[in-house]
Amino acid sequence: QVQLVESGGGSVQAGGSLRLSCDGSGFTFWRHSMGWFRQAPGKVREFVAAISWGGDSTRHADPVKGRFTISRDDAKGTVYLHMNSLKPEDTAVYYCAASTLDLALGDENRYDFWGQGTQVTVSS
């Protein structure tokens, strides 16, 4: 059974940091590219970051570039999202996703599996 389980969300003040984790199981983790997306209240889900097989290539959306970093540990079957300098507009439910493509980027349709999400709330 395929599972993606996010953790690490919570409430933090603006300027603070969080590290999200997503543990994958039930599939060949190292042969999947991974992505993070987020959905704020009343808004559509948007792409945050993606990482390729092996972690050689990464992409970050413009709103988070320079503040967020995606990484992966294939031995643990885990992908991370390191979030620094958080802003109130980063408040959202954050989802991880897995794709059989080498680097699925921001197209949700390219992802095969999704987690249930973890809430991040940033107060001013």
Image (tube, rainbow, N blue to C red):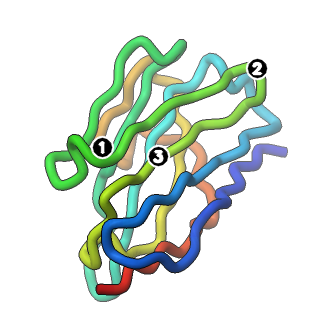
Which quarter of the figure has residue 98?
top right
The Cα–Cα distance between marks 3 and 2, rounded to whole angstroms, is: 18 Å
Which label number is shown at residue 107?
1
Q: Earlier in the sequence, mark 3 or mark 1?
A: 3
Query: How far from the left and from the top, in percent, is residue 84?
Result: 37, 53
Q: Is residue 113 above or below residue 38?
A: above
Find the residue positioned furthest to the left: 62
Query: How far from the left and from the top, in percent, is residue 88?
Result: 28, 78
Task: Identify residue type, mark 2.
Answer: Ala
Q: Nearer the viewer, residue 43 or 58?
A: 58
In this rendering, position of residue 9 left or right of residue 2: left
- Foreground disc of the pair 3, 1: 3
Query: How far from the left and from the top, in percent, is residue 86?
Result: 33, 64
Could you tell me which residue is drawn at 73 percent across and 30 percent down? 77
Which quarter of the figure has residue 117?
bottom right
Which label number is shown at residue 75?
2
Q: Tell me, yes or no, whether the two marked residues, 1 and 2, touch with CB atoms within 8 Å.
A: no
- Foreground disc of the pair 3, 2: 3
In this rendering, position of residue 103 left or right of residue 21: left
Which label number is shown at residue 82?
3
